[in-house]
Image (tube, rainbow, N blue to C red):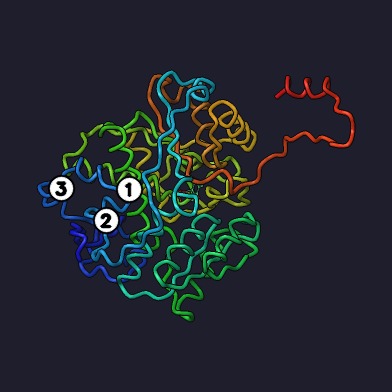
Amino acid sequence: MTTNTHFTHLECSMTGETYEDAGLKNLSEAGKPLLARYDLDKAKGALDRDAIAARHGGFWKWRELLPVRDEASIVRLGEIDTPNIALRDTAAWAGAKAPVWAKDEGRLPTGSFKARGLALAVARAKELGAKSLAMPTNGNAGAALAAYASRAGLTSACFCPADTPEVNVREIALQGAKVWRVNGYITDCGKLVGEMKDRFGWFDVSTLKEPYRIEGKKTMGYELAAQMGWKLPGAIFYPTGGGTGLIGMWKAFDEMEKLGWIGPERPKMIAVQAEGCAPIVRAYENGEEHAEFWNGARTKAMGIRVPAAIGDFLILRAVRQSGGFAIAVNEDEIETARRECGRRDGLLLCPEGAATLAAQKKAIAEGRVDADASAVLFNCGSGLKYEMPDQSGSLDKDAPIDYAALAEELERA
Ligand SMILES: *Cc1c(COP(=O)(O)O)cnc(C)c1O
């Protein structure tokens, strides 16, 4: 059965060159990301935004605006719409005077929003005849690839930086992928995939090196608009690694305007990076169109430890067109934000998500965003996958309890 998709062709994001044959493809002739295009005029007459929004099935509900053609290619693992959680106390701590929500993507299958992109990439690759998929990953993408590929009956291979959190490396393997640790960065892992893929018959699903992961990530834009009554927030703070989600949402807003679902208003798109790996921030501040490789990348927020992004110019373009900016925060600010959100609002953020909260606080303090503008912070993965500081006390059940000391500890908590 057909998905009734309005997908038509691919287009080079740099030159605009079109590719009518949308078979298994990586980059354009110009070596740049390919973007999926749709017949939006036709879709405009055929689709009812509210009827689609009312469906179940998480991001697959937007199937007419996704590239998968055959219902049978769709791979499901219990996708849901992720909740927008109002941060009350935490927002006040950050200096915000308008509503602030955390969109908690950690609730998706495999515990991160990488599920959105990889579900689409896997479904499309399967539909186009690929048997085996490979990718570099800082952890979360690998878990999503492994799970969706196994579910679809495909094999997969992942290459991780050697210091990728243990839990990620192991969950990747348990969900059926072969995984290797590499003594380098994600960019080094990507090079290895490029060198080996022909020998082993792998299709490379590196982010933005195939056209469909971004289509999965764009559903964040559709979903957010629908959840907010088709009125977008004043600002979106996005933890930016490869930038696929930011570029994807920007694309979704454009598509929705052409569909007549939203007006021309856009949120300020704010790309958040860690001070130890901030190539996009540096390029933004230097007024550059492309970002230079970041040497010696360091941050605990592994999802944004990306020294070079192939879609750099697309990230920078979206940020500038939206009137937003790129901002870096340090490791202490990330850790503090993580702790404050947990104790004030009961929401455990991942370090990347905490970076967006730290960035909001900093941006408000520096007058770069209006405290009266509503904001959505993206918590892109489950906080449970990351190291957590030990703040526990200990008790000896066989000794008399020192109640005065306990009372003091309670006081300090
Ligand atoms: C991958 C990842 C990011 C970065 O996402 P991009 O769209 O590639 O920039 C941020 N946070 C987490 C938790 C991630 O896994």
Q: Position of residue 349 (x, y in %)?
A: 54, 38
Amino acid at the residue labelled 2: Leu
Q: CA distance from mark 2 to mark 3?
A: 13 Å
Amino acid at the residue labelled 3: Leu
Q: State the image quarter where residue 130 is shown.
A: bottom left
- The vertical placement of 246 against 119, above or below, is above
Q: Which residue is mark 2?
A: 66
Q: Residues within 10 Å of mark 3 (few under 14, many from 20)?
A: some
**Earlier residue among tags 1 and 3:** 3
**Earlier residue among tags 2 and 3:** 3
Residue at the farthest bottom position: 199
Element on which disc 1 rests: helix
Q: Residues within 10 Å of mark 1 (few under 14, many from 20)?
A: many
Q: Are marks 2 and 1 in contact (CB under 8 Å)?
A: yes
**Earlier residue among tags 2 and 1:** 2
Within 8 Å of ligand 1, the CB of disc 3?
no
Element on which disc 2 rests: loop
Q: Which corner quadrant holds the N terminus?
A: bottom left
Q: Which corner quadrant holds the C terminus?
A: top right
Amino acid at the residue labelled 1: Thr
Q: Position of residue 228 (x, y in %)?
A: 30, 32
Element on which disc 3 rests: loop
Q: Position of residue 90 (x, y in %)?
A: 52, 25
- The vertical placement of 338 against 71, above or below, is above
Q: Which residue is mark 1?
A: 219
* 346 sits to left or right of 118: right
Q: Which residue is mark 3?
A: 47
Q: CA distance from mark 1 to mark 3?
A: 16 Å
Q: Residue at x 38, y 31 (%)?
A: 235
